[in-house]
Amino acid sequence: MAEIVLDGVTKRYPDGTEAVKSLNLDIADGEFLILVGPSGCGKSTALRMLAGLEDISEGEMRIGDKVVNDLAPKDRDIAMVFQNYALYPHMTVRENMGFALKLAKVDQAEIDEKVGQAAKILDLENHLDRKPANLSGGQRQRVAMGRAIVRDPSLFLMDEPLSNLDAKLRVQMRTEVSRIQSRTGTTTVYVTHDQTEAMTLGDRVAVMRLGELQQVGTPKELYDDPVNLFVAGFIGSPAMNFFSATIDGNVVHLPIGDIALSDEIHARMKAGSDGGSATRTVIAGVRPEDFEDAAFVDRAHHAGGYEFEATIDMVESMGSEIYAYFAYEGESARSEQIAELAADAGASEVPGAEGQQAVTRLNPDSKVARGERARLWLDSTKLHLFDPQSGKTLTRAG
């Protein structure tokens, strides 16, 4: 196991393109860190630099107490799990898992012992003599992980290892990956495009955009306290709703109505760099789960929110909850970061990115219906406000 330090690490290609820009990141010994972001954000390049598969243009990278900038991959004491399983089809599970140790001329008895231990952790004991063609996708992925585990490295690097699995199997394997990492206690850096994987797997999550680190923190910190529009829109499913809004004193004017800012949010605004100017244009963010069917809101909580009427465009019943979409009048929230989120996820998946529509997550017993007016409630204490030009939050705690 080892602590990982990336100090100003940059990857610059000959044409001048910077895939990773001055990345500063400390990963604790035994930590499970997720690198997440849209395609082309630099997360896989950062992982490949850790592995030694990409040269570092600037900065310093340390694994443990050793600077590894110029070390070959074989000298870094790492093990990598790829998107494709990269198993040898003519070898059994036992042979695949022990092959790296065999190349290293490890004693056969020790190979057998390590393969046996890894097979027990991965629940592969009954499959050791089978070949990859006779295994399911999830079993093949566990074999690929077993091949990494037997080496007992100081660092696991995983590059979207579950992306080739179907949706149901991915959910099962997320649990497996988390359990395995917990049992081995090995420092792990895991790259994914899937923010659900990031939120459910990692001790901490590092969000990247255009080669730059946007925010790093626990899943809850990123969800509750995003530093900018990009993190706010990327983290959470369904995505955060964004509204064009104007602040006048302690009131924010939204397309759905005028909402008095809570004392806490107003205090954060006043503590901002502009001193909380009296009137300004902002982008307001509201998570779907911060809406509710007004009929299910306890009267004692109504004072902390805002009630309004809306026509429901579409209803999706998920069993344990209902997603209800409503249209609103007014200008759509627009910014470079919102446009980037829309391009990555598809405009229909980013409320407010195209057209004027918002999504709410309601009580499963709600009677809201498509085409009908509904009485909805918004928890105004959960409102997020952002600067339209910089995208930075204006209401971050602390």
Image: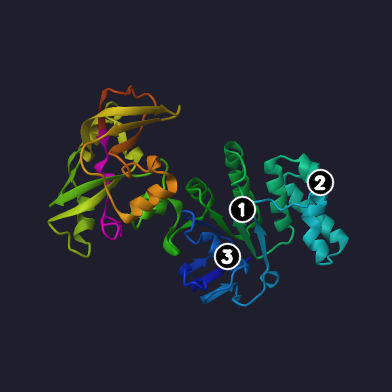
In this rendering, position of residue 384 left or right of residue 35: left
Q: Which mark is residue 182?
A: 1
Residue 39 position within the rendered picture, expressed as x and y whole percent measured from the top left:
49, 54
Q: Which mark is residue 128?
A: 2
From the viewer's perspective, is the residue at label 3 or at label 2 nearer? 2
* Secondary element type, mark 3: loop
In this rendering, position of residue 224 left or right of residue 300: right
Q: Indicate yes or no whether the magenta region holds residue 386.
A: yes
Mark 1 touches mark 2? (CB < 8 Å): no
Give the vertical position of 86 relative to 131 (above or below).
below
* Residue beneath the point at 87% across and 59% down: 109
Give the vertical position of 217 relative to 296 (above or below).
below
Q: Which mark is residue 111?
A: none
Residue that lies at the very extreme toward the right in this rendered image:
108
Q: Which residues are magenta?
A: 377-398
Q: Kindly identify which residue carries mark 3.
A: 29
In which quadrant will I find the N terminus? Answer: bottom right
- Asked where in the image residue 295 lies, by quadrant, the reply is top left
Comparing 118 with 59, the one in front is: 59
* Secondary element type, mark 1: helix
